Image (cartoon, helix red, strand yellow):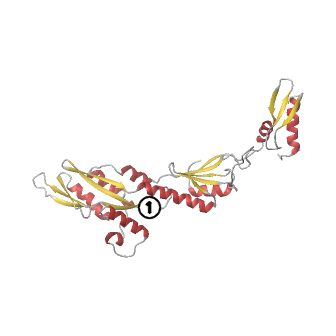
Amino acid sequence: MEFTKENIAETVAKIVEERADADLIALGNEGKNPTFIAHHKNQTLVNVTEEIDRALDKFQPARRSGTDHLHEIDSLIEWTNRFKGSNSVLFCDAEQPSLTCITNYHGEGAATPEGRDPLANHCDHRGVYKFPHSEEWKAWSDFSGKWKSPGEFGEFIEDRSADFYDPTPYLANGTGEAGEWEKKLADVAARLSGRFATYRRLLELSRGLEIHESQTAKFKRNPDTGEGQIFFEATQAGQDGGKIDIPNLALIAIPVFENGAAYTLPVRLAYRPNGGDVKFRLTLHDADKARRDAIREGAEKAKEATSLPLFYGAS
């Protein structure tokens, strides 16, 4: 149906006819404020504008509204480019990781001091992308910071073998060219008084612990390197004791969010005596910083791809 002045006039005429003995009252500028019918007989007011809107909404909504939920950041970008206008903006919420496009946001400029603000808008046509954590991030976050038995530690090391990243020559022994990310990781190792272990060494550690599982553990730490040693003493005849070197740092490369880039993260390895046994703990170092960096990277990608203003916060 094509909307014309005649269509609207017919709707108004019908309303007036249904409410005989009534006057039309227009408030303010035409099209900006509602028009009422003053019904003389029962002293009531009828909002004609609302009646017209309801009649026209049967054929086509007066404006766009609603919230669409996108499952990938590229879909949010495509959605935004499809519906964006001169007042569209992006909001990035780092606390509840999400990226929102509001296509009908308020216009740029100061609000008018009096009357209806011509820059105000409804802000109710939205596209939302909630950053979903990757399976790798969930697994490490769940394991991080918890003391585990040698068996649990070894099983996790083997199950997550694909996540580990061997140190480069610069990180291993300070040789070769170094990128900025390597220099930052080297600084982390220096602050924590440690060196990054290879996955092979961690694997040897986890398997060595299985061999000595029934023996009594004693501990010694090297204050210069931060690394430790566990000495095992035989508790049964015929068993040989042994010594295992314990590194205190490792590297992993995992995506923070699904379909996101992999981040190289330091992992701290700690141990403590538990009677005659030993407990181990793996802890992601600066995990919150990596998470925020990944959110910002996604938000800046959307900003560049849509050419829209980006605000960090929620609306």
x, y percentage for residue 70? 59, 51
Quarter-of-image position of residue 298? bottom right
Instruction: Please state if 253 lies on the left or on the right of 20 as rendered.
Output: left
Q: Nearer the viewer, residue 186 or 98?
A: 186
Farthest top residue in view = 42
Instruction: Please state if 37 lies on the left or on the right of 108 as rendered.
Output: right
x, y percentage for residue 223? 23, 61
Quarter-of-image position of residue 207? bottom left
Residue drawn where x is 61% and y is 62% of the image: 305
Instruction: Please state if 188 lies on the left or on the right of 65 as rendered.
Output: left
x, y percentage for residue 312? 55, 53
Residue tagged by mark 1? Answer: 263
Farthest bottom residue in view = 176
Residue drawn where x is 14% and y is 58% of the image: 241
Instruction: Please state if 98 lies on the left or on the right of 191 as rendered.
Output: right
| Residue 162 seen in this snapshot | no
In the rendered view of the protein, which quadrant contains the N terminus?
top right
Q: Is residue 143 above or below residue 22?
A: below
Farthest front residue in view = 113
Residue drawn where x is 32% and y is 61% of the image: 192
| Residue 158 seen in this snapshot | yes
x, y percentage for residue 10? 88, 39
Quarter-of-image position of residue 287? bottom left
What's the amino acid at mark 1? Tyr
